[in-house]
């Protein structure tokens, strides 16, 4: 079975709720605490490929950092990768992924659909 990994921020209610669903369903997973600098540009590229999204699609546009420095400005995908690597708190969370696929865990129904697809018999 594919190892399930969760990009997790323990201060985020949506992220904690995703872990709660996984625990209630007895789905084994590992956690990447991405705010501690655990993601590099290649990790982000791989994750975005699995999500089938561009870097700007996973930016938390409600975050104060985004509003202060990035809102209303145009950036290339390469620039967004640099921004997200340098400011991981701007990455939407949670993100669940395995060897084949990934999903943004908002809304929580995305988490349920993902685990039903890959981890339920």
Image: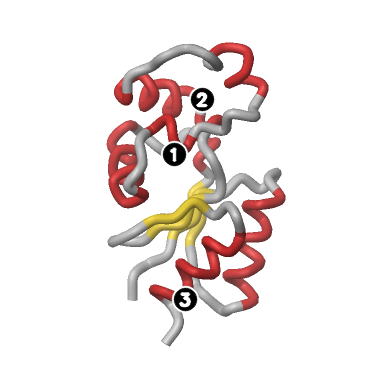
Q: Which mark is residue 87?
A: 2
Quarter of the view holding residue 100? bottom left
The structure residue drawn at horizontal position 58% and vertical position 70%, both measured from the top left corner, is: 22
Crowding at dot 2, Cα within 10 Å, few <14 / some 14-19 / many 20+, comes out as some
Q: Nearer the viewer, mark 3 or mark 1?
A: 3
The structure residue drawn at horizontal position 39% and vertical position 24%, both measured from the top left corner, is: 80
Mark 1 highlights which residue? 38
Mark 3 vs 1, N-terminal side: 1
Mark 3 vs 2, N-terminal side: 2
The structure residue drawn at horizontal position 47% and vertical position 33%, both measured from the top left corner, is: 37
Left/right placement of residue 75 relative to residue 107 reads: left
Q: Position of residue 12 (x, y in %)?
A: 68, 45
Q: How is the image coloured?
A: secondary structure
Report how far apart the C-alphas of labels 3 and 2 lie in the structure. 32 Å
Report if residue 95 is visible in the image. yes
For the image, the number of numbered tags is 3
Q: Position of residue 91 (x, y in %)?
A: 51, 36
Report if residue 89 is visible in the image. no
Mark 3 highlights which residue? 116
Quarter of the view holding residue 75? top left
């Amino acid at each position: 079975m594919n190892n399930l990994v969760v990009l997790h921020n323990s201060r985020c209610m949506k992220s904690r709720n995703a872990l709660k669903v996984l625990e209630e369903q007895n789905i084994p997973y590992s956690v990447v605490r991405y705010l501690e600098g655990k993601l590099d540009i290649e990790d982000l590229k791989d994750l975005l490929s699995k999500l089938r999204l561009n870097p700007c699609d996973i930016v938390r546009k409600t975050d104060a950092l985004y509003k202060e420095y990035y809102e209303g400005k145009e950036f290339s995908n390469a620039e967004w990768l640099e921004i997200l690597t340098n400011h991981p708190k701007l990455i939407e969370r949670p993100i669940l992924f395995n060897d084949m696929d990934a999903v943004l865990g908002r809304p929580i129904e995305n988490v349920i659909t993902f685990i039903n697809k890959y981890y339920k018999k």
